[in-house]
Image: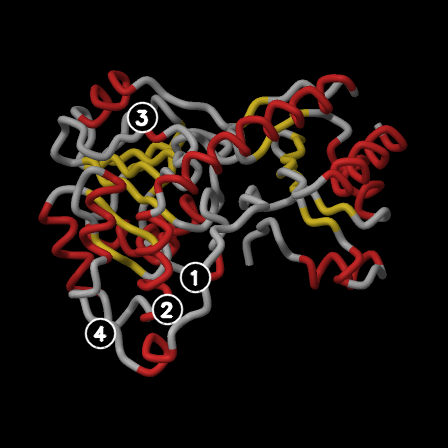
Amino acid sequence: MLEHGGRLVEAARRFGIPREDWLDLSTGIAPWPYPLPPVPAAVWQRLPEEEDGLEAAVCAYYGAAGLSVPGTQWALEMLPRLVPPGRVAMLQPIYAEHPAAWRAAGHTVVGWGDEADYAVLCHPNNPTGELQPHAALIELAGRVRLLLVDEAFLDATPAETMIGCAADNVVVLRSLGKFFGLAGLRIGFAFGPSEFMAALRERLSPWAVSHPARWAARLALSDRGWQSAQRQRLAEASARLERLLDGLGLTSTGTALFRYAPTPEAERLFTKLARRGLLLRRFAAPPALRVGLPANEAQWQRLEHALKETA
């Protein structure tokens, strides 16, 4: 099993701290989820139908028609199976599920910039937060059979999207998990050439996306006022977190949802903070910590005090 953030049960068992006593900043999921109203009984009782307004909401929010999928994890595992085995370039470090999925489908993962048949990147990158120029990505798309762009963390800066780019072999994945704070819904969207979308659709089982997930997604994607306020909240919190880490000598990069701090002390800091009930995401190669956003002032104070005691 690959390591991910948010594994509180494992952390609680390892460090002997009850789950409810942890502050989990390991995932990069927004600490202020979209405030869903109570789910109507009919949504629980009836199978989903496509005539529910979700497709229109997707098109209005993303600027293009997209295919609803049961989480982008499903799509990133399925896409490598749609193309012949070959060499796939990936920007490292990267979300570990991408190289795992391509290797499982018989591909060879190579370095970014190496000669390749396919290319995959997170945009912004997970975990470093880097963004690549559109022109460079379009040029890259002209040299490979497929460019897969995972935009899980892009909603805070939507103008950077590759959806609707000029190339005809670019597939983009988006999700409601991070910006909207609705990771538990397991719903995402794929955008790209009709041949890839048709192949993905053929592999979807009937009612693959649950009725509650479709209902919630339509509401969240349609609420422009909340989205604007969320972007402002995230920008302010991310800037505050950057200042906090910088003040402790931890230079960081990142997105509006997390900061990424390379440091040879990553393992030591992770362990010391975990013993205080703070869960961060640590990386071994290169050694680094990824820190998500606290939800309120009490959490900010807890993080700041713990960092000052351990840094």
Of residue 111 and residue 35, the one placed in the foreground of this image is 35
> Between tags 4 and 2, which lies in front?
2
Decide if residue 244 is on the left or right side of residue 84: right
Which secondary structure lies at badge 1? helix
Alpha carbons under labels 4 and 3: distance apart: 33 Å
User: In terms of secondary structure, where does tag 2 sit?
Assistant: helix
Q: Residue at x 30, y 33 (%)?
A: 119
N-terminal of the two: label 1 or label 3?
3
Q: Nearer the viewer, mark 4 or mark 3?
A: 3
Could you give the CA–CA distance between mark 4 and mark 1, rounded to whole angstroms?
Answer: 17 Å
Q: Earlier in the sequence, mark 4 or mark 3?
A: 3
Q: Which residue, given by chain and number where applicable, does mark 3 sit on?
A: 159
What amino acid type is highlighted by mark number 3?
Ala
Give the percent coordinates (x, y) of residue 250: 72, 21
| Labels 4, 1: front one | 1
Q: Quadrant of residue 1?
A: bottom right
SS class, disc 4: loop
Mark 1 sits on what residue?
185
**Upstream in the sequence, badge 4 or badge 1?**
1
Residue 145 coordinates in the image, percent (x, y): 17, 35
Label 2: which residue?
A: 212
Residue 206: mark in rendering = 4
